[in-house]
Amino acid sequence: MTYAYDERLDGPLADHDKSVIVRDLHALLPDLQLLHAKEDLRPFECDGLSAYRITPMLVALPATIDEVQTLLKYANAHGVPVVARGAGTGLSGGALPLEKGILLVMSRFNRILDIDAQACTARVQPGVRNLAISQAAAPHGLYYAPDPSSQIACSIGGNVAENAGGVHCLKYGLTVHNILRVEVVTIDGERLTLGSEALDAPGFDLLALITGSEGMLGVVVEVTVKLLTKPQSAKVLLASFDDIENAGDAVAQIIAAGVIPGGLEMMDNLAIRAAEDFIHAGYPVDAQALLLCEVDGAESDVDEDCARVDALLRTAGATEIRLAANEAERQRFWAGRKNAFPAVGRISPDYYCMDGTIPRRELSRVLRGIADLSVQYGLRVANVFHAGDGNMHPLILFDANAPGEMDRAEAIGARILELCVEVGGSITGEHGVGREKINQMCAQFNSDELTFFHAVKAAFDPSGLLNPGKNVPTLHRCAEFGAMHVHHGALPHPELERF
């Protein structure tokens, strides 16, 4: 069904009158599901970064692209901000709603539209779960490579918004490397197709631009992903170390030797113990660090690479090396790593998950820095890494009910991100910037670069209505950076004052 837009509804609303917006949207879109009662809005007040909570003015759950187009056109005409949300598993406050804005929840867009086994592609709606794509492709001997730890729940639209990765992104790339085409709706209701099912598309590479843009440029309504053939063989080596810096050095040696593992993950002792207690993966709980190295491909190549990796690990100081005996043990090894976040949640009232990326050569230095910061701020830190590509996830343990602990957790998190920048890295690898890291964007980029980012934003969204106050700070904010602090989600955003 196509809904006709009524131009008589154009014009600014006084202070975003909620009752008027609800009335107008019901008139425009009689089939649109709208939530506006306070008790119905509570489940949407945060994403996976639950430290920050804001109750949205109202929640819209469209089921068709026409509904999305009409709603965005209405919002644009009346100056009402819109935040798009997928499964709500994000970890940077990117889907945090606005008190005077519409939260556009895309969870009803949950259909796999087509799987082309010959072309090795799948065309899906944005609310389809990451893992569901691989499950649907499995009968054809195919799968979708990016596998975030939240893949059982996270949606492909959210993966595009954050450019998500996962434990196998070292060899197979991030979301941007595994999608061919995306359809988006802009704030003025225009439907754009970015990319192509061909190997390349003419014009500027806007597909790469929209990937990782965190819902600031448009709302994703359809995605075409690449599918890969399942490897003939996959084997995992688990290596224990009595020194975490030796484990970090081993990572660099494996990559320098020309071996590109399917996955190369690292955990420190605190994360090892938590995961083993939760999953019983067979991890060595006395080890100071462990590495999981998966090699996949043709059987003969896998056997040869496993032997090379084994030798490199021993040279680097591994105290024990185990090759998964069968597929069941391989899955257990990975289950421990993929459940590290919830496992840590069992040993602390709260934890703050960071996401930074560093050059592999700096891994040992950054680990020492995190250990020093842990002592300085009096908070434990469990380290979990996509070690092969330098993407680190320190988990800062704290108790939000203990006076001052949340402030200290935020402070140490900021220092860890700034340390990443100091060594030549980035403040994010796959979780995005969102609301959480907006101060550290000022450490990552200079004023000319930020001005350019704002110009790109303005080209797509001149009024700044899509996910405002996220990702890219104003120059005014950066001028104050250093004197500003994040306190319980109450962030000073001059660019949000009109909302």
Image: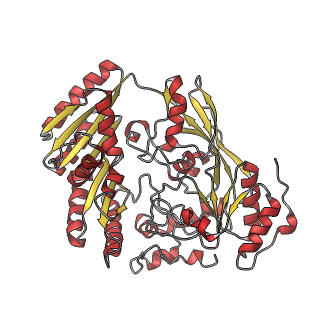
Residue 12 falls left or right of residue 377? right
Residue 182: percent from the left, percent from the top?
Answer: 63, 44
Q: Does residue 147 appear anywhere in the picture?
A: yes
Using the rendered view, name the quadrant where residue 446 is placed. bottom left
Residue lying at the far front in this picture: please name it.
39
Residue 181: percent from the left, percent from the top?
Answer: 62, 40
Q: Up-down: is 126 above or below 379?
A: above
Looking at the rendered image, the quarter that the C terminus falls into is: bottom right
Residue 73 falls left or right of residue 424? right
Using the rendered view, name the quadrant where residue 239 is placed. top left
Q: Does residue 260 appear anywhere in the picture?
A: no
Q: Up-down: is 226 above or below 400?
A: above
Residue lying at the far top in this picture: please name it.
300
Q: Nearer the viewer, residue 473 or 321?
A: 321
Query: How is the model colour-coded?
Result: secondary structure
Q: Nearer the viewer, residue 336 or 36?
A: 36
Using the rendered view, name the quadrant where residue 459 is placed. bottom right
Residue 467: percent from the left, percent from the top?
Answer: 59, 64
Residue 416: percent from the left, percent from the top?
Answer: 31, 64
How many numbered circles does the render carry?
0
Q: Nearer the viewer, residue 348 or 473?
A: 348
Residue sitting at 41 percent across and 41 percent down?
169
Q: Up-down: is 376 above or below 248?
A: below
Q: Up-down: is 108 above or below 178?
A: below
Residue 303 falls left or right of residue 475? left
